[in-house]
Amino acid sequence: MNEEKYKIITINHLVNNKIINELDRLFSRYPTEDIYYKIENANTIKIYLNQLDFSDFKNTTTLRIHFIDDNTKLLLKKILTKIESIKSYGLKGRKRVYVGYDQERKVRNRKLKEVIRKKYYYAQDHNFSKKNNEVPKEFINKIIVGDSEEVLKKLPDNCIDLIFTSPPYNFGLDYENHKDGINWNEYFNKLFRIFKECIRVLKYGARIIVNVQPLFSDYIPIHHIISNFFMENKLIWKGEILWEKHNYNCKYTAWGSWKSPSNPYLKYTWEFLEIFSKGTLKHYGKQENADITADEFKKWVYAKWDIAPEYNMKKYGHPAMFPEELAERVIKLFSFRGDVVLDPFNGAGTTCVVAKRLGRKYIGIDISEEYCKKAEERLRSVLIQLPLFDKGGKKYE
């Protein structure tokens, strides 16, 4: 019999024939795969417990106490006390049932449990280095004009604490001369080359968070496509936040069938924040550098955020901005003061503005010079003195 699945209860008590007879009578009521006993020596009894209807066991034992001698009675009381002191009980109907030492052992040995059930199995065989590096000073607190794929290649491995971004959508929004109404394969190939660099520069234990909405007009679940890419590249899916915008003025309401199941069109008033970690789920930092309050933490870990959309997009000349409140929640919940926050699709600079206001260092990259100028204008309202941003590796004058 495999004894590993049993909890062994040792009871010291002088053994005699009366005791053996009484134990045989008691334990014969239960399957040996649930509970049984052994006489270890003249003074030691071992009980092997896997699971037990304790209520039934206690009633049976209590009834027998009226028919046995004091010495045997004392032993049965010891057995009851020992078993009742074990806290691994569950409810089955109205009975207290020992849930099984084999399961308890797995809970206690959490490492073994993770291996058995293959916790984030898709990321177990990653080869990420645990050695983190510093960001070169020339990149700190900079807005950089350029192709993110090329700019990120200049950064060392494992140097960024948090990446928060929202890649441009592929339904015809103009990004100056760089229209993103391109072939879908080209779009995702380019996006994933940039994300490859993001994974490389992300610190061990750091997070990348992507704000994205399903492209419902083209029936493309882009949030699933992006998540699948990160999982294939061995990042750990930490979770998903639903950003409820309560924006009911959908411009595609005329699509689909009306009052008919033939082709009902689903309208979305929310977007997703897909959250991934590199190598491990825990991001290390000094507790004194955590600036999230207890109330904020309790509210924000509930993964449905009701935040109004950004209404000042015309002011900044950008067609697809997320609000500062969204960036503030992400940055405070997933980073420490002094961390380096990167946005490789910086746009009008919301991520960088909020990062600076919250005492983080920032790096913003965008292919549009006009958006970079807008980002700097916004940062000037936060900073007393703003460094010049780089353009193609040179100072922008």
Image: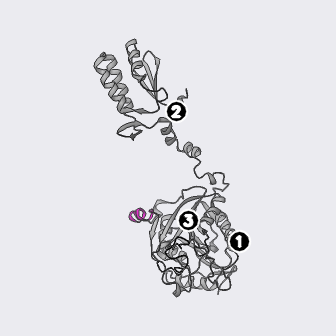
Q: Is residue 48 visible?
A: no
Residue type at mark 3 is Glu
Tell me: residue 213, above or below residue 43.
below
Q: Position of residue 139 (x, y in %)?
A: 63, 73
- Say which label, 1 or 2, has the lower sequence index: 2
Residue type at mark 1 is Asn
Highlighted range, magenta: 293-302
Q: Position of residue 92 (x, y in %)?
A: 39, 40
The quarter of the picture where residue 122 lies is bottom right
Q: Quadrant of the N terminus?
A: top right
Residue type at mark 2 is Lys
- Label disc, if present, on residue 274 of the rendered structure: 3
Rounded to the nearest angstrom, the CA distance separating label 2 from label 3 is: 40 Å
Q: Secondary structure at mark 1?
A: helix
- Say which label, 3 or 1, has the lower sequence index: 1
- Label disc, if present, on residue 213 of the rendered structure: none
Q: Position of residue 356 (x, y in %)?
A: 51, 75
Rounded to the nearest angstrom, the CA distance separating label 1 from label 2 is: 53 Å
The residue to which callout 2 is attached is 5
Q: Secondary structure at mark 3?
A: strand
Residue at the image position 58 percent from the left and 55 percent from the top: 280
Please rate how many residues cluster around mark 1, counting C-alpha atoms within 10 Å: few if below 14, some from 14 to 19, many from 20: few
Rounded to the nearest angstrom, the CA distance separating label 3 from label 1 is: 21 Å
Q: Is residue 315 left or right of residue 62?
A: right
The quarter of the picture where residue 214 lies is bottom right
Q: Taken as a whole, is the magenta stretch helix, strand or loop?
A: helix
- Foreground label between 3 and 1: 1
